[in-house]
Image (spheres, rainbow, N blue to C red):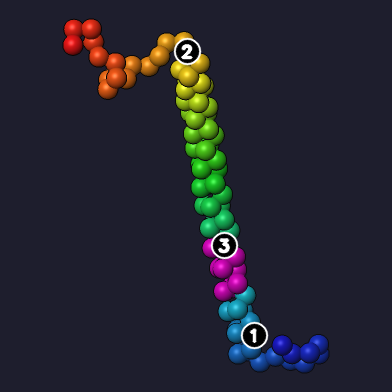
Amino acid sequence: MAPQGVRMSQNEINHLKDLIEDLQSRVLFQEDTLQQLDNVVIQQSRQIDLLQQQVKILKDRLEAVRSSPIRPFDPDSDRPPHY
């Protein structure tokens, strides 16, 4: 870059304009990418919340079965009386 008071050639000015345009394009691309990633994170967070709720429901059901006084049927050791 030229020090203050020094004139720049048209080629240098055009080069700087091209660099600025390139940087602006990159920033826009990065902003778009960040927005897309943010949307994915939001979607995955919702999915995780739903899965956690489902796991809690299954855990509660399992605890209810385990604490039940009724023994689960075991086909290997529990034979019907007619055998």
Give the camera-side residue of 81 and 11.
Answer: 81
Q: Residue at x 46, y 10 (%)?
A: 69
> Which percent across, then down, holds residue 57?
50, 24
Mark 1 vs mark 2, CA separation in Å: 82 Å
Which residue lies under the disc numbered 3?
30
Q: Residue at x 18, y 7 (%)?
A: 82
Helix, strand or loop at label 3? It is helix
Give the camera-side residue of 37 and 3.
Answer: 37
Let me know if residue 13 is in the magenta part: no
Which residue lies under the disc numbered 2?
68
Task: Please report contact status of discs 2 and 3: CB closer than 8 Å, yes or no.
Answer: no
Give the camera-side residue of 64 and 34.
Answer: 64
Report whether 51 appears left or right of 18: left
Residues packed near mark 1 inside 10 Å, few (<14), some (14 to 19) or many (20 plus) = few
Residues packed near mark 3 inside 10 Å, few (<14), some (14 to 19) or many (20 plus) = few
Q: Amino acid at mark 3?
A: Gln
The range drawn in magenta is 21-30
